[in-house]
Structures are given as C-alpha cells and as structure tokens.
Amino acid sequence: MNSDQRFFDFLKERIGLDVTSVGTAIIERAVRQRIIAVPGRAADEYWQCLQHSAQEQQALIEAVIVPETWFFRYPESFATLARLAITRLAEIKHLRALRILSLPCSTGEEPYSIAMALLDAGLGPHQFKVDALDVSPLSIERARHALYGRNSFRGADLGFRERHFNVEAQGYRLSERVSEQVRLQVGNLLDPALLVNEAPYDFVFCRNLLIYFDQPTQQQVFEVLKRLTHQDGVLFIGPAEGSLLGRLGMRSIGIAQSFAFSRQGAPQPQPMPAMMSTPLPAPLPAPLPLSQVAPRVIPPVVRPRPFAASVTPITEPKTSDAATLLANIAALANAGKSADARAACQQYLRSHAPAAQVFYWLGLLSDMAGSALEAQGFYRKALYLEPQHAEALVHLAALLASQGDAAGARRLQDRAARSGRTADSERKQ
C-alpha cells in the first residue's frame, strides 16, 4: 500500500469495499479523478475536503462504483423465483402480498426483472411488491428514470422487451405497469438501522456483493441479510458466493444455476478460518454469479504435470456441431440438470478438442456443488486454454480471495479488468 491507504480505509469504512477485491489501481484512478476535478488541488487538500464534504464523499463512492448489470442476468434465478412465488402465495393462502428485496439494485435492471418475471408468471400487481436499495443516489435516480440503452439488454431471448418497454428516441422506456411494482430508495447494507422497521422479506436478491468484502464484513453483511430474509424465505446470491453461504449456515435449494439458498435444514455455520498469508498451490485434477466460495484451509498438494501434457490431440469436428453441444450444456445447466450437464461436458471432451467454455461450465457446476478444490482446477484449465476467459478469471479470483490468497486474487482481477477494457474498446470500434 502507499499514501493512498487513507482512501482505501475510507471506502472500507463507508461501503465495506475491500481493496484486494477490485485492485488498488481502480481506487487510485477514482481518487485521481476526484483530485483533478478541481485544478491545482493536491492529494492532501483533497483528503481534507473529503473529511468535511458529504457531497465529495458520495462523489468518490460514485467514481469507484461502476454499475455492470443487465436485465435477466442469470435467467434461471428469475424462473426459479416465479415458481417459488406461486408456491409461497399458496402457503400463505394469498392473505398478503409477497415481499421481495433487491440490493444493491444498481440502476434498476434487477428489481425490474423481478417484477417482469412475476407479472409474466401470472401474478397480479396486488400480489407482490419489490423494494430496491442501492448506496448510490445516482444509480437510484437512473433507475427511477427507467430509460435504458442497448447494453441493458443481452442474450438471445429479448421477448420481455417487446412486452414491457416502449421505444423512444433515447432508448427503451419501461412500462409503468412494471415500474409501479418497485419502490426505489438509497440504502447502505452496513447501516445497522437498515430497514429495521420493515417486516422480513419472502425473497431477497443480493448478488455479487459479498465478493467485494473481507471476511469480517462478509459476516456482518450476512447477519443483516439473515435478518431481512423471512425464516421460510429464499436468498438469491451470485454464482461465486454459494460455498460462502454454506459456511455461514445456509443451504442451496437444489436448483442449478438459480443460486438460491434457504435456512431450512441447513447445517450449523462453521467457524471462519483465519486468513492465510501464503498462496495455495492449485491442483489440476485429471473436473457463470458477479464467484465465491467459503474460506477453507486446504493442505498443500503436489502440483501435477501441466494440463497440456496429458491431452491427446483430437481433430476438431464441424464448428456447428461444437456450438450445438455447448448450447446443450448451457441448456441442461440452466434447467437444473447438473448431472446431465456434467455428462454433456464429458461427452464434449471425449469427441472434441478441449474448450475453455466446457471447463468453465464444469468449474461453475463444481463451485455450486461446494467442491471448491475441484472448481479451482477446472477454472485453471479454462484459463490455460483461454487466458482472458472473463468469467473464469472472476470466479477463480473469488475462490482464491475466499481462501486467503489475496495476492493471487488481485492478479486475476487485474487480468479480468484488462480483458474488460479490451472488450469495451473492441465494441466501440
């Protein structure tokens, strides 16, 4: 760390951000941007300004937070929510509306996806309400505006856009029927008084947030999430946070790619191990959730020979055949058929040259099953074949961070950030 440590500490105190989760470069760049916003201002002068200006404090937070979200991200989560919501209404005999929480909600794509999914599933507007919170007032204001560009719509299935949006010159305007289901407000998960007067929620979405916190903050935030989630409720998290939730006393509801957890029948939380000071060797067995596994102490292992040494070259079949098999793997996983998805991956590897995306899927399936060591090996195989595979970089970084290898995680995060910048540059050309 350098003289910017004071800014790292400020962000840790205000929003819980662990500098190792995003890398020092991102925070340092944000600080520089705020320093030069006033010509001639030096770092010490800016620090003094930061201490006394709530407006500047929020400006720095906004400079660090770069929203990256889109509608129906992790689509199986929303399909699962719709099915569970119908069941939950029957359980409570339709005596009240379902309560759903989305935080952090960023610029609104997630809470609005929740509302669209439930309306499309046949629920009436009176049967559910969505609360959406974010630490960024700017993001909340954009969410209230409910006007979105093309970057908010990704994937092949965009039928919801035809049903729920109107085309305007500046983009796509969300229909009032959807926006009226969502109550947006500014809120900080580290605030002990957050929603203290609210009844617990049937469903809580808090995805790809825990990966940005250190272990004590993760525990603190989890206690808040547990308080906000009904005893019979379901918590939706990011792909990399599954094993962490297991360590904290939750269990997966068993629907693949839904990233949904409950307290029903969960084991007692296990003690969180101390952070380790040295990186763990990563095994390569001879086998995409912004990605998180619970910290665990793993004994050193002997590193096997490089993956490439054990691969027998295979003549690659027609590209269309490979694409069809990859699409089948994704479809099986998203349908919750984890065993079939694994079998499809193995079938692909028997008849095709090794593919990074197949090893990424195997890693994700292992990650969600709680097999952190196995997942790590698969992610490394994916990165051997495709060094800038964005999802594998992010998920492996989170695995290393949760195991105490902050330096290894930071290296991977830096690679992912470079990959993202390259992709953005290519899209603009």
Image (spheres, helix red, strand yellow):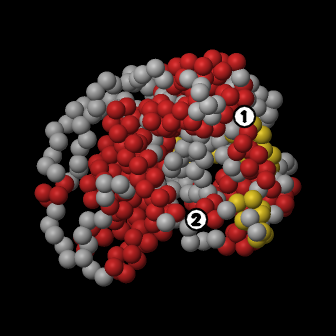
Q: Position of residue 32 (x, y in %)?
A: 53, 33
Q: Which residue is nearer to you in this view: 114 or 201? A: 114
Q: Position of residue 392 (x, y in %)?
A: 38, 52
Can residue 158 be seen?
yes
Say which residue label 1 marks. Answer: 187
Q: Is 320 situated left or right of 302 in this image?
A: right
* Crowding near the residue tagged with mark 2, few <14, some 14–19, many ≥20 C-alpha atoms within 10 Å: few
- The residue depicted at 40 percent of the width and 64 percent of the height is 341
Q: Which residue is nearer to you in this view: 95 or 331? A: 331
Q: Is 122 situated left or right of 31 in this image?
A: right
- The residue depicted at 39 percent of the width and 42 percent of the height is 414
Q: Position of residue 176 (x, y in %)?
A: 84, 60
- The residue depicted at 43 percent of the width and 56 percent of the height is 422
Q: Identify the disc placed on residue 92.
A: none
Q: How many marks?
A: 2
Assign a secondary structure to mark 2: loop
Instruction: Of the two numbered discs 1 and 2 on the same chain, state the one appearing first in sequence.
Output: 2
Can residue 16 be seen?
no
Residue type, label 1: Gly
Instruction: Check contact, mark 1 vs mark 2: CB within 8 A.
Output: no
* Crowding near the residue tagged with mark 1, few <14, some 14–19, many ≥20 C-alpha atoms within 10 Å: some
Q: Position of residue 241 (x, y in %)?
A: 49, 42
Residue type, label 2: Arg
Q: Quadrant of residue 85?
A: bottom right
Q: CA distance from mark 1 to mark 2?
A: 28 Å
| Relative to 9, residue 38 above or below | below
- The residue depicted at 16 percent of the width and 62 percent of the height is 311
Q: Residue furthest front?
A: 40
Q: Name the quarter where the N terminus is drawn.
A: top left
Say which residue label 2 marks. Answer: 154
| Relative to 225, residue 175 above or below | below
Assign a secondary structure to mark 1: loop
